[in-house]
Image: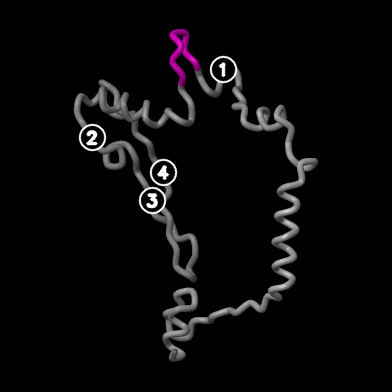
Amino acid sequence: TTTKSHIQGSGRARKWGAKVFYFDNDPNKEMKGADLVQRTAKEASLSLTHTEMQDSRARSDIEGVHPYRTASGAEISVFNGLQLVYQYAQRTMGQSFRPEESMLTYEEEVVSDFPFLTRKKLVVVRIPSPDGFF
């Protein structure tokens, strides 16, 4: 292979003057480490009990806050809240709409000059009502 093809195949370093880093690992040491991870994962004395596993999976409710439950049994949570807001807005407006265009306003900000990175930041959320947006 040529130097150019080697560099292009090394982590997609395509820019002229790009740096390619090589790591010199001892294969025997790495195999011993992998074996230790395997043995540790199989060690029953280190695993959680059934009760501990159930506790870690349990949802922690904060009474009156999250998830919010209405008297009729409806639930509002982080998992369905955005969908509920969009459904409300669509019903209020009486038509199909794109929330990104009518409800949400973003600003783009520079995160890093080098490498140049930007991100969109949500700055305004407008909720429709029968009297207009608020």
**Can you give x and y, in whole percent of width and height, for residue 83 in the image?**
37, 30
**Residue at label 2?**
97
How far apart are the alpha carbons under marks 2 and 3? Answer: 21 Å
Separation of disc 1 and disc 3 at Cα? 34 Å
For the point 40% across and 52% down, which residue is it? 120
Residue 52 — which label? none
Q: Considering only vertical position in the picture, is 90 above or below 32?
A: above
Labels 4 & 3 near each other (Cβ < 8 A): yes
Identity of the residue drawn at 60% across and 18% down = 63
Foreground tag (4 vs 1)? 1
Q: Is mark 4 on a helix, strand or loop?
A: strand
Q: How crowded is mark 2: few (under 14 residues within 10 Å), some or many (20 or more)?
A: few
Q: Which of 90 and 107 is in front in this view?
A: 90
Quick one: label 4 or label 3, which is nearer the N terminus? Answer: 3
Upstream in the sequence, badge 2 or badge 3? 2
* Label 2 – label 1 distance at C-alpha: 32 Å
Disc 1, SS: loop
Measure the C-alpha gap from mark 4 to mark 1: 28 Å
Q: Give the range drawn in magenta.
A: 69-75
Question: Residue 31: x, y in percent?
Answer: 70, 67
Q: Name the residue under label 1.
A: 64
